[in-house]
Image (cartoon, rainbow, N blue to C red):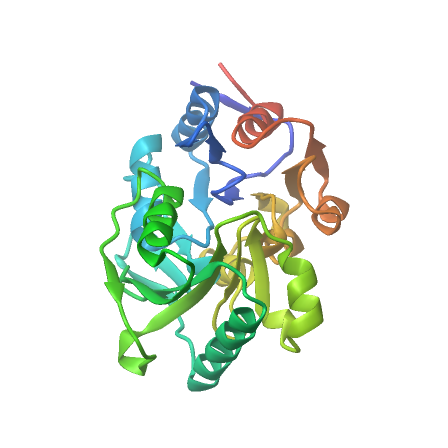
């Protein structure tokens, strides 16, 4: 198989997961077969495909297995950049945890959302793939937990732990506020929280807090320094607010019509296609395989 690039020099592809590579449809998370083939061909050609997601590292590994690239992909970016794992060296390129002041912010957010009487859960993620239910504000907390586990997806293997306090030994890398119903997080954040720049909307159901100065863009920059590449070699693909820092890198920046306006403004290509399909189309548009 030979590769002909329509965009000379592209060799690194950083791709968001939910809403980009992965589509949630009919209560299932799916990657289009055409997109799987495009990713596989891309990797076989010698290019590098890296998932950059808010999900935990083991979730990315499962996606790599589904794509058939678990032996080929050099890195994974998890927890919105709090964890960058070098798969070739089997070591961290980056790991950062939430601080004591972040713990205070988490509790303040919970108290505020309680007063607003939102039905939500505050779920925390540990450095080594632990997932903690910290605070559930819902009429039926058990039903809420089951719904969250279902929403996480069938490719996720979580053992949820219950905690009633925040401790540094938990090595927490991310907090997520997940709302059972589609929620106007942007308005709530703008109206009620002064630390707006620290709270990142990640879906129609959620916003998140990660350690200070952590982002997908920062993670990409670390990889750029490690492997000595420039933006001219990079394509980024994303669909949400937490992908904005990614779009500060790369020469080709791809999203779809459902993305927020400020992401579309940074994009070099906006597809009128659903999640997963637009990724496969973008890869095929920039590479011809034969």
* Residue nearest the viewer, comparing 257 with 213: 257
The residue positioned 33% from the left and 35% from the top of the image is 69
139 to 271, vertically: above or below: below
The residue drawn where x is 35% and y is 39% is 63
Provide residue 227's location: percent of width, then percent of height. 45, 56
Viewer-proximal residue among 141 and 9: 141
**Left of 100 or right of it: where is 255?**
right
Whether residue 68 appears in this view of the structure is no
In the picture as drawn, the residue positioned furthest to the front comes out as 139
Image position of 241 with respect to 29: above or below: below
| In this rendering, position of residue 179 left or right of residue 71 | right
87 versus 100 height, above or below: above
Residue at the location (46% across, 51% down)?
A: 53
**Percent position (x, y) of residue 38?**
47, 25
**What percent of the width, then of the height, locates residue 119?**
49, 58
Q: How many numbered discs, if any?
A: 0
Does any portion of residue 48 appear in the rendered image?
Answer: yes
Q: Answer with the quarter of the image where residue 213 lies.
A: bottom right
In the displayed image of the protein, which residue is found farthest to the top? 290
Q: Nearer the viewer, residue 65 or 203?
A: 203
x, y percent for residue 173: 39, 68
In this view, the residue in front, 127 or 24, is 24
Q: Is residue 148 left or right of residue 184?
A: left
Quadrant where the N terminus is found in the figure: top left
């Amino acid at each position: 198989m030979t590769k002909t690039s329509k965009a000379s020099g592209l060799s690194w592809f950083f791709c968001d997961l939910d809403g980009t590579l992965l589509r949630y449809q009919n209560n299932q998370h799916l990657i289009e077969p055409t997109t799987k083939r495009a990713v596989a061909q891309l990797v076989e050609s010698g290019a590098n495909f890296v998932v950059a997601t808010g999900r935990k590292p083991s979730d990315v590994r499962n996606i790599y297995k589904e794509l058939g690239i678990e032996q080929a992909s050099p890195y994974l970016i998890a927890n919105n950049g709090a964890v960058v794992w070098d798969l070739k060296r089997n070591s961290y390129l980056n790991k950062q945890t939430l601080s004591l002041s972040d713990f205070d912010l988490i509790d303040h957010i919970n108290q505020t959302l309680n007063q607003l009487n939102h039905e939500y859960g505050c779920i925390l993620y540990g450095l080594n793939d632990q997932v903690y239910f910290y605070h559930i504000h819902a009429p039926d907390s058990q039903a809420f937990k089951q719904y969250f586990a279902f929403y996480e997806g069938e490719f996720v293997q979580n053992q949820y732990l219950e905690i009633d306090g925040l401790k540094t030994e938990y090595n927490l890398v991310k907090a997520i506020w997940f709302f059972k119903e589609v929620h106007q997080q942007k308005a709530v954040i703008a109206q009620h929280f002064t630390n707006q720049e620290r709270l990142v909307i990640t879906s129609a159901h959620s916003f998140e807090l990660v350690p200070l100065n952590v982002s997908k863009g920062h993670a990409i920059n670390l990889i750029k320094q490690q492997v000595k590449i420039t933006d001219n070699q990079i394509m980024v693909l994303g669909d949400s607010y937490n992908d904005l820092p990614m779009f500060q890198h790369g020469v080709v920046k791809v999203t779809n019509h459902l993305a927020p306006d400020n992401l579309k403004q940074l994009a070099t290509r906006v597809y009128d296609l659903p999640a997963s399909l637009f990724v496969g189309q973008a890869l095929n548009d920039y590479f011809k395989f034969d």
